[in-house]
Image (tube, rainbow, N blue to C red):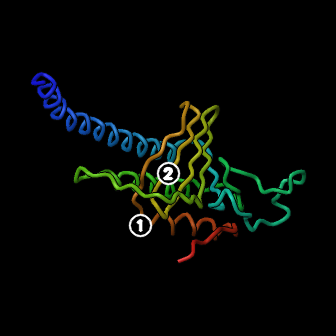
Amino acid sequence: MKSILHVLLCLSFLAPLRAEDEMKKWIANLEKNAAQMEEMATDDGTIEILSLYPSQLSKPPVDEDKKNPETKEPPKFHSYPVLNRAQVTDPKVKKELLTELAKSIRASIPTDGGITVSGCFNPRHGIIYAKGEKKVELLICFECDKVECHDSDQEKPRGFTIQSSAGPELFNAFLDKQHVNRDVPEK
């Protein structure tokens, strides 16, 4: 009995070390994601911004000409209906959008040892980045500050947090300037 208590006591001291290691990995991944956005911002890859309908269950308000003629459904981006899309052709705008995303990722890096977790994930924005065979697709929810990243170099999608004050306005201003319909969250 004494040896079992001894083992449990030893293990209880290891748990915080494991949590600290996991936190370091989390922070390293956030930094890696931010660096990837900065690299994408300045290279010759293309990006397209998508306006998404955040529900996979209800019918989105999509113009008939945007629907698939066979299924009468709007196109989907990782199961989310696409309301519209716009190609980013100006390199300055591309850099501004992706640099803001990188700043938002870095701003979410915890400085107090804690991680904030939200539950909604209602992505209203998507990004498609392409350069040769490389493709990165992002679903962004500015309501809960989460991003889901599908990278052609990785087997599984990865998720990460952002902390943005300018991001939604910047992305929405771009979409509005391109006359792209978008879903506006209820307040």
Three-letter code for the amino acid on which mark 2 is drawn: Val
Residue shown at 46%/57% (left/top)?
Answer: 119
Q: Residue furthest front?
A: 1
Badge 2 marks a residue whose secondary structure is: strand
Work out whether residue 13 can be spotted.
yes
- Asked whether residue 51 is in view, the answer is no
Given this view, does label 1 or label 2 mark the residue nearer the observer? 2
What is the distance, in whole Å, between disc 1 and disc 2 at their CAs?
Answer: 15 Å
- The residue nearer to you, when weighing 153 against 160, is 160
Total numbered badges shown on the rendered structure = 2
The disc, 1 or 2, on the residue closer to the chain's N-terminal end is 2
Q: Please name the residue that numbered disc 1 is placed on.
A: 165
- Image spot of residue 145 (x, y percent): 45, 58
Left or right: residue 96 versus residue 117 is right
Frontmost residue, 120 versus 39 = 120
Residue type at mark 1: give it. Ser
Label 2 packing within 10 angstroms: few (<14), some (14-19), many (20+): many
Task: Identify the disc placed on residue 4.
Answer: none
Question: Percent x, y for residue 158?
Answer: 49, 40
Q: Residue at x 42, y 55 (%)?
A: 162
Residue at image coords 59%, 61%: 124
Q: Residue furthest right?
A: 70
How crowded is the residue under tag 1: few (<14 C-alpha within 10 Å), some, or many (20+)? few
Q: Residue at x 52, y 47 (%)?
A: 148
Position in image of residue 118 (x %, y %): 43, 58
Q: Circle 1 sits in a helix, a strand or a loop, which is it?
A: loop
Q: Which residue is tagged 2?
A: 147
Which quarter of the figure is the N terminus placed in? top left
- Image quarter of residue 108: bottom left
